[in-house]
Amino acid sequence: MDEVVVEDDLGDRRFAAPTAKDVVMTTWHDDETLEEALEFFATSAVPTDGYAANSGYRLVMCVGNPEWAMVARRFLKAAKFLI
């Protein structure tokens, strides 16, 4: 994610001009079920104003676990995002 933000600063803007108040949020959910973490992602991980406009960027990483990747893919296709 950090690379996307840096590339955006250096090249063609994909985000509305971020301000000093805008942030990139990453989270860790090792004490929650996959479904709980995905629910948080769909309902609470909302981009700040500078990143929200024209942004389709969402990233879920399931490293080394193809079963979780399938669950996440199904969840994300059905998810109702707040934005």
Image (tube, grey):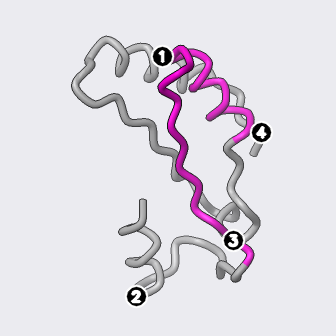
Instruction: Identify the mark nearer the N-term, 4 or 1.
Output: 1
Question: Residue at 73% of width from left, 38% of height from top?
Answer: 44
Q: Is residue 82 above or below residue 1?
A: above
Highlighted range, magenta:
21-44
SS label for mark 3: loop
Q: Is residue 82 left or right of residue 9?
A: right
Residue matched to label 3: 22
Q: Residues within 10 Å of mark 4 (few under 14, many from 20)?
A: few
| Quarter of image, res 65 | top left
Q: Is residue 8 magenta?
A: no
Instruction: Identify the mark nearer the N-term, 3 or 4.
Output: 3
> Mark number for residue 10?
2
The amino acid type of the residue labelled 4 equals: Leu
Q: Is residue 25 left or right of residue 83?
A: left
Residue matched to label 4: 82
Residue matched to label 1: 74
> What is the quadrant of the N terminus in the image?
bottom left
